[in-house]
Amino acid sequence: MPGTRSRRGLLAATAAMLSAALAVPAAHASPAHGPTRGGSLVLIGGGLKEDNKAVYREIIDRAGGSAARLGVLTAASIPASRDPNADDPARCSNSACNGAYYASLFKQHGAADAQWIPVDLDHIANADSDAVVAQVNSMTGFFFGGGDQYRYVTTLLHGDAHTDSKVLAAIRAKLAAGAVIAGSSAGAQIMAGADMVTGGDSYQALRDGSSPGYFDDPTRLGYLPAGGFGFFRSGLIDTHTGAAGREGRALRLASDTGHPRVYGLEENTALIIDNPGTPAETATVKGTRGLTVLDLRRARAHTTTAGWSLSGARYTYLTDGDRYLPQTWRALPAPGKHPITPTGDTPVPANNDAFYSPANTSGRPYSLLSTARALAASRTQRTATASTFETDPRYTVTLTRTQPTTAWAHNSSDPTTLTSLALTITPN
């Protein structure tokens, strides 16, 4: 869902916009010149800020630039009927209100038009409405907002059959025809194929493993075997990866379900996918943070009386401008980045909270990424460890520099891009 926002300015016309949307606006003629490239995805790890011009413009440009018409879907939010502040534009946080918010932002960033697509838990029937399908067909791109990805499953897919509603089928056809589809947080998660994550914290995931389903306990690692919409299938997707320390749950889910790769999306940063689902698929990072790629092709998991362990995984972290080629598993640092030679003599600091435990009320002093970067900068260490804040058991993550591990940076000796650190997890 949207973070900090200046709602009064952005949603001054919310009531009028929602009235029009709930009446299901008539379809408009498609613009004369829409997107010219093949369909693409823009996946954002959550926390998309209002002033992130680079990401908003990326979506708009791929939807046709000044002719872009964006359809906004926010069914992952609670519906207005469950929002006690539904009548207050300054405080509301429901699907209709958030739809108007994002539509206003896309217009501010240069889209010709942006409209809420009125499908949510209050309007599930609209997912099979011919009038809403006509609205979808008038759009050149789509944006899925955050919240709970399971609500997208509930509203846009048909039950246990997991078949497309008419609206989702129309969006799928638009992607195939060249449209851009973007999503943030739950809106990125729902793009996944099989075994889409539904919740969970890293420590509980390492300790207890994963289970198919959707659970009221937010710490329990759950997943849907049938997955989400299946727009993106070259790896599992996780979001808020650094901010919520989700590398642990991502590794456990991938290992449990037999997936060889996970893309961990960072907040306010986009992963742009060109030619999704084809041998020419490419991924490009855009934003101030980055992307974690976890490679489990040679990983092996074991469970003993001490607990679950994993060996043979690889950790890569990519930043702005870096590209990744899923077909060949190759990371390509951005032009202008150079490989660095480690020069640091300071020992890698101790890390007793690798995954940002909610139980650590003393703050968030460190992260797995911090340990990885400190190791890459060290001239004297080839191995560093980070442990979980929780005990019984306490899990230790060991990172090791091995060939072909490399670190890259712009104009400094501080590593920003890291490739292929060896990673193991052991219980103590």
Image: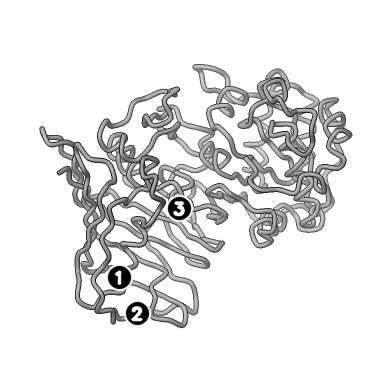
Q: Where is the N terminus found, in terms of image quarters?
A: top right
Disc on res. 376:
1
The residue drawn where x is 22% and y is 58% is 385
Quarter of the rendering containing residue 328? bottom left
The residue drawn where x is 71% and y is 37% is 98
Amino acid at circle 1? Ala
Please rate how many residues cluster around mark 3, counting C-alpha atoms within 10 Å: few if below 14, some from 14 to 19, many from 20: few
In the orientation shown, which residue stands out farthest toward the front? 362
Instruction: Estimate the spatial distance between the alpha carbons at disc 3 and disc 1, rounded to whole Å.
Output: 32 Å
State yes or no: discs 1 and 2 in contact (Cβ < 8 Å). yes
Instruction: Estimate the spatial distance between the alpha carbons at disc 2 and disc 3, rounded to whole Å.
Output: 31 Å
Amino acid at circle 3? Pro
Task: Determine which residue is flagged by label 3.
Answer: 279
Residue 237 lies, with reference to residue 332, above or below; the image says above
Q: Where is the C terminus found, in terms of image quarters?
A: top left
Q: Say which of marks 2 and 3 sits in front.
A: 2
Task: Determine which residue is flagged by label 2.
Answer: 340
Residue 392 lies, with reference to residue 322, above or below; the image says above
Q: Earlier in the sequence, mark 3 or mark 1?
A: 3
Q: Say which of marks 3 and 1 sits in front.
A: 1
The residue drawn where x is 66% and y is 21% is 121
Q: Earlier in the sequence, mark 1 or mark 2?
A: 2
